[in-house]
Image: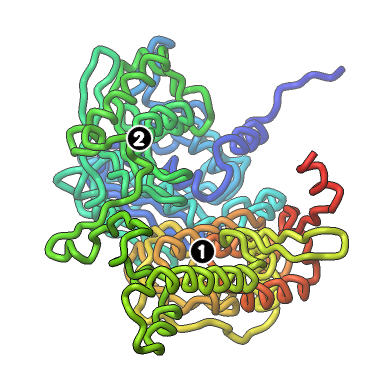
Amino acid sequence: MDIRILPSNIANMIAAGEVVQRPASVVKELMENAVDAGATKVSLIVADAGRTLIQVIDNGCGMNPDQAVLCFERHATSKIRTAEDLHAIETFGFRGEALASIAAVAEVVLKTRTADAELATQVSITDATATEAGKQDVRETSAPVGSNFAVRNLFYNTPARRKFLKSDAVELKAIITEFIRIALTRTDIAFSLVSNDREIYKLGAAQTLKFRIRDIFGEASADELFPIGTETSIARISGFVGRPDAAKKTGANQFFFVNGRYFRSPYLHKAVMKAYEAMLPDGSQPPYFIYLDVDPHSVDINVHPTKTEIKFEDDNVLFTVLMAAVREALGRSSYADTLDFESAALPDMHNVGRSFSEYKPVESLDKSDSSFNPFELDGFENEKSWYQQKPGIQKQDYSLLHDQALEVHRQNIMESARQQELLVKGKYIMKAVPSGFMVINAQRAMERILYERFLDALGKEEPVGQTTLFPIEIEVGAANMPLMEAMLPYMQRMGFDYSQFSVNTINVTAVPSGLVDDKMALSALMYEAVTALVEEQATLASSMYGNLAGKMAKSAARTAVMPIDAQSAQKFADELFACENPEFTADGLKTVHILQLDEMDKLFR
């Protein structure tokens, strides 16, 4: 076995596989370095979703010539001096691998100057083998105080890595997401983001976190939040949590930060959801922006190369503290303490006000009461008409008329039942077949119908939608806006139409025929469309039509108009069996079941 030490350029490329997974990884590392450098203004410029250019300009402390050269060497860092320092990390970067890894897979030019220097230093690395000190192109130049990193042609020397990047819209979404996470950590810093010469964000330094949230997500999103704040020996918790009625089925803004660093934690997310228990509809997610300040010695942020996974010393205690803090915030905002969970399932009471008589309940009736008029009962309109056509009937004939009216009413009910025998509570359609009963799951059937309708529409170029009465404003988030733009031609083919209204919202002006133009339903639909595109490796093409059509059909079927009578049920069934595969949804769930006669016989044994 021949064991040897890897050359530094190969070692850097291996490290880059951990640190630089996509353009957003470069954005994260460079912006974090800018914040660590004490900048009060950070600008991010990207071209072609970071493939062609990622440039981060800051007005931080800058570097002298020696530091500018040394920073590209692996494990060169200003954050760590001893092993003890690893237990008290208070900056974003500290391992010293980021710049070396970026330079190993891209062409990098750095211009940097300190406040006491007249000229800036420019370091250019256009060859992955030239990342060590003494091998770069170093020269003096003019530049303002701070640092300017320009990263071009990412993965130019690793074409396999470049091939696995997703579409520009998906990669730009990831870049915007990283930008937002960092902008939420420091409200005192001004941030800007420009993509392909178009300004997406220009955030001034914000007075408070609430203002920063408003600037990023819009005023409507900020108004849905109320503050959370508590301090214990374990942690100080601050930030904002959302009103229960602001919860969404999909796409809720949810952020955790510890000591000013964004992190993910499914475990602590459960603590938040536990605090909202019994306040949210099934499947809904509340927005939250939660900041934890803990002793740096009690948290390990070095468990993952991207430093987004955190290990706490006592996460069980933190779980309890966080859950209690969220519950307290809900209580202060008159949610937790005013909900009566025992009667939460009871129907809403009418606010009768001045119209009390309109809702006055019918008093109990005695058949022997000669003053009882059966034709005043609901559903007796036909009988009442029949009675009114027979003048001369006296009051004493009411008893006879009552029996006759009840018989007519019974016949009407039976006829109504015959007309609606196909429908069962709007959920199932039943029809007699020679072997028993055929039962159709209406929602799944609608899903199949919509799936084939959408799939067919995607193969054409003719819109099949209906215009909404008024434009419907839907919040999709700035990070998703590039995806919405990329999907527009395909969404139009399915019957949707929309345009960008603000940095975070779109105006929907058309929906597919048969779909309810409900704001919440449309929000879920748009999220499913975004998800379908994010899951794809490349661009929207015929290969992903099935994925997009399937997700859209599943979401749309939840609020689509279902059959309401026998005629529409029959038409609905006919449309289902005209499908190419009527027995299953796009993801393989049964739409139809034959209830055999022998199965029915067993029910009566």
Type of amino acid under label 2: Tyr
Please state which of residues 284 and 339 is positioned toward the viewer in this rendering. 339
* Residue drawn at (44%, 43%) of the image: 28
Tell which of 335 and 246 is nearer to you. 335
In which quadrant of the rendered image does the C terminus lie?
top right
Q: Is residue 55 above or below residue 473?
A: above
Pinpoint residue 380: horizontal percent, then vertical percent.
42, 73
Residue 12 in the image: state x and y as whole percent: 61, 34
| Residue 230, numbered circle | none
Q: Is residue 547 left or right of residue 208?
A: right
Residue at the location (40% across, 48% down)?
A: 252
Q: CA distance from mark 1 to mark 2?
A: 25 Å
Residue 36 seen from this side: no
Q: Quadrant of residue 80?
A: top left
Q: Which mark is residue 559?
A: 1
Amino acid carrying label 1: it is Thr
529 above or below 41?
Answer: below
Q: What secondary structure is found at the residue carrying circle 1?
A: loop
* Screen quadrant of the N terminus: top right
Instruction: List the residue tagged with mark 2.
Output: 276
**Callout 2 crowding tier (Cα within 10 Å): few <14, some 14–19, many ≥20:** many
Judged from the image, the secondary structure of the residue bearing numbered disc 2 is loop
Colour theme: rainbow
